[in-house]
Image: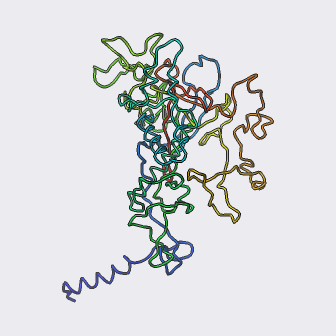
Amino acid sequence: MRFNKLTVGALALLFLVPTSCKKEQSSTTGWNYNDSKWGGFEKHEYAGQETGPGLVLVKGGTFTMGSSEHDVLYEHDNIERKVTVPSFYMDETEVTNNHYREYVYWLQRVYVDYPEVSINALPDTLVWRDRLAYNEPYVEYYYRHPAYQDYPVVGVNWRQATQYAAWRTDRVNEMIMIREGILEPDPNQMNEANFNTGAYYVGQDDGLRLGKKQMKDYRTKKGTRRVRMEDGIMLPDYRLPTEAEWEYAAQANVGASTYENVNNKKIYSWEGLTVRHTGGKEINRGLINANVKRGKGDQGGIANRLNDKGFITVPVGSYWPNDHGLYNMSGNVAEWVMDIYRPLSYEDMTDFNSFRGNFFTKKQLDEDGVVDLKDSLGRLVYVPVSEEENIGRRNYKKADNIGYLDEVDYMDGEQGYEYGVTTLIDNQARVYKGGSWNDRIYWASPGTRRWLDEEQALSTLGFRCAMHRVGAP
């Protein structure tokens, strides 16, 4: 039988049309997905989580958390323990003065009726003062002068850092929505009428400018709808890293492993047992790998051969990154993490995704059980979970789990020991990690840990953000 070109084309069309237009079906019911005739239940392809601005993917795994040097302070609060950390994202560098000024500027521009919001967000520049040193120039210039715009922000307490991360979540997700054409830029947002990720998801998005591209609603033939979490368009929350995540990222054993074995545990965030650079160009050999205090009275070396070149902090992209591509995990500034401090954290912790500091909450509902309550800043209101609603649960009962396993009679925040009498550790004591420009090299080891009240700040303490990795590692 002979075929001409027209016949072949017609046959090909017969085979192609049914398959190209066929809807994906449920493997359990056989119903079509994304089809208004079948009810409009949606299933979308997901290419994977995009990397948010400033972030680096840290591939998860198992590592030995804890000390890698002699415990010179004999505190025994970092006993070695093997744990597993799932994949996550972390900022490539510390948050800079310029990044933080952008945040404060936004607060000033939007919350015009609430000037105290931006005032409360300002760093404490007085942390630079020393009763036996002349540091007034840093008090005056460090935060605002362009010479220091790429230096890490300091003087930020734990609460301020946490609030910055929440703000950053909303600004990045707003940018994604604008990029996708779902929203239009609106520099005139004011007070509570601003984009908030949580409020948008529940329909409390007063006054947002809609773009030309809206999500198709398959429940109707021509309808549109708002973006849902199921679409995978917006990113998870920016936040502070947990202590386990920070330490895992700082160790960066990914570059020191052979198959499933780590032959030599690192002391610092770089390879080798010395604090000096051993690889690369010969001109760099012997230089200090991080911005730390080399010895008594030695902040950076002598004038004709400055070594770490950092009398105080240095620009956040300085020195060599570790094997995860992260800068200054062992120096420049120490960094806040999410955890509450306890001396026995390493003994009490769960060995997967370890964290101490859980206080479980839920969205506040109105009388009809609808989420429509926002605070004066446009954010959803959260309330603690109650024991009554968790009677049948086995994994938790109450909201406050900060002292779980830590105190025998821990009830509603009461301590099992006397704060201010036998200890200064309470539920506001937050962990911070890593060495700083004014610390000896001992603190540059990722396993070391210190704590500070969450409302206090230091000239040696900054932060960087992290984000959960959804889906495959």
Residue drawn at (24%, 82%), measured in percent from left and top?
9
Question: Relative to the observer, which residue lies in front, 18 or 105?
Answer: 105
Vertical arrangement, residue 125 with respect to residue 14, above or below: above
Residue drawn at (48%, 59%), measured in percent from left and top?
232
In the image, is 179 to the left or to the right of 80?
left
Q: Position of residue 162 (x, y in %)?
A: 55, 40
Vertical arrangement, residue 253 with respect to residue 367, above or below: above
Residue drawn at (50%, 31%), measured in percent from left and top?
462
Outermost residue on the front side: it is 113
Q: Position of residue 329 (x, y in %)?
A: 46, 30
Outermost residue on the bottom side: it is 1
Count of marks overlaid on the render: 0
In the image, is 448 to the left or to the right of 104?
right
Q: Position of residue 320 (x, y in %)?
A: 37, 29
Outermost residue on the right side: it is 409
Display coloring: rainbow
Q: Position of residue 318 (x, y in %)?
A: 37, 28
Quadrant position of the N terminus in the picture: bottom left
Residue 240, located in which quarter of the rendered image? top right
In the image, is 334 to the left or to the right of 277?
right
Residue drawn at (48%, 43%), measured in percent from left and top?
108
